[in-house]
Each structure stands twice: as C-alpha cells, then as structure tokens.
Image (cartoon, rainbow, N blue to C red):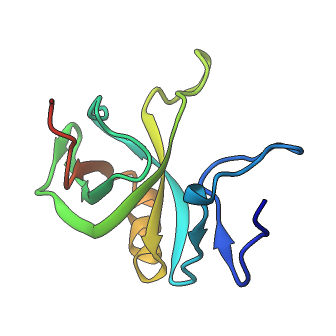
C-alpha cells in the first residue's frame, strides 16, 4: 500500500473512515481556485458530469420577465459536483452545481447572484457517443 502524498492534495469526493482511495482520484490542490455552489437557469445537459470544463454566463433582468444580453463570467470553470434539487417545499427548483473557479472571478459571480441574475453554464466539451 502506498502512503499519502506529501504537500497539499484534494480528493474530489467524500471518503468514509476505512475506505481505500485509488491513487488516480488524488489531485494536486490549486490555491488559486475555490468552490462555490450556483443555481443554474434552464437546466443542465444530461451528459454533464463532475470534472467537466464549462463557461459560466449570466443575464440580468432588465424589466419583469425580460433579460439582457448574456455576459461571460468565467471561461475556465470546472464542475466539482452536481447537487440534487432541493425538496418539494423549497422555493427554488433550479439545478445546482458546485463549481471550481479562479478566486479572482468569485466577486463578479457573487455580485451576479446577489442581483438575481440568471446564471447558465455551457459545457466546453461533451463526450461523443460511441
């Protein structure tokens, strides 16, 4: 059995006590990135999975029910996790994803979220049908 790597590292999923972790799951920690959970308007592509590279776009409501042109928030986001929808009594039925973003893009995204803009993601690559 191998030992834990030296330095900072990440494992992209929960590990329970006593579980073995395949070395292929261990990644190098990136201190320039952080994670944030975002509600996505309009649904998610069915092929989307953790690890997917995506662009993150937002569109601000200009008048009730009308949204302005989309603005690119991040061209280098990565899906960390697709989260289950909230319960039936929740006010939101939006899809939620945990994204890894450069820390420099977090203030812009938080401003978008606090202003109730719609947020959408566009996969950069999807696995082709074989």
> What residue occupies the far top of the structure in this picture?
88
Quarter of image, res 83: top right
| 130 and 47: which is toward the camera | 130
Residue 60 percent location from the top left of the image: 25, 55
Give the residue furthest to the left.
Answer: 69
The residue at the point 40 percent across, 76 percent down is 105
Q: Nearer the viewer, residue 3 or 58?
A: 3
Across and down, in percent, residue 117 comes to: 33, 53
Image spot of residue 71 (x, y percent): 18, 64
**Left or right of 92: which side holds 48?**
left
State which quadrant residue 41 falls in: top left
Q: Quadrant of the N terminus?
A: bottom right
Left or right placement of residue 121 versus residue 37 in this view:
left
What quarter of the picture does the C terminus occupy? top left
| Image quadrant assignment for residue 101 | bottom left
Find residue 57 and report its horizontal and vertical position in percent.
24, 58
Q: Residue at x 79, y 69 (%)?
A: 3
Compared with 9, 125 (above or below) is above
């Amino acid at each position: 059995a191998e030992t834990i790597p030296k330095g900072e590292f990440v494992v992209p999923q929960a590990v329970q006590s006593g579980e073995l972790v395949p070395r292929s799951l261990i990644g190098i920690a990136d201190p320039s990135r952080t994670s944030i959970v975002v509600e996505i308007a309009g649904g998610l592509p069915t092929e989307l999975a953790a690890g997917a590279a995506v662009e993150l776009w937002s569109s601000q409501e200009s008048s009730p029910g009308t949204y302005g042109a989309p603005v690119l928030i991040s061209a280098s986001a990565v899906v960390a996790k697709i989260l289950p929808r909230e319960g039936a009594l929740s006010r939101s039925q939006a899809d939620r994803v945990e994204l890894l973003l450069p820390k420099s893009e977090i203030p812009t995204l938080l401003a978008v979220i606090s202003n109730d803009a719609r947020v959408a993601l566009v996969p950069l690559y999807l696995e082709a049908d074989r």
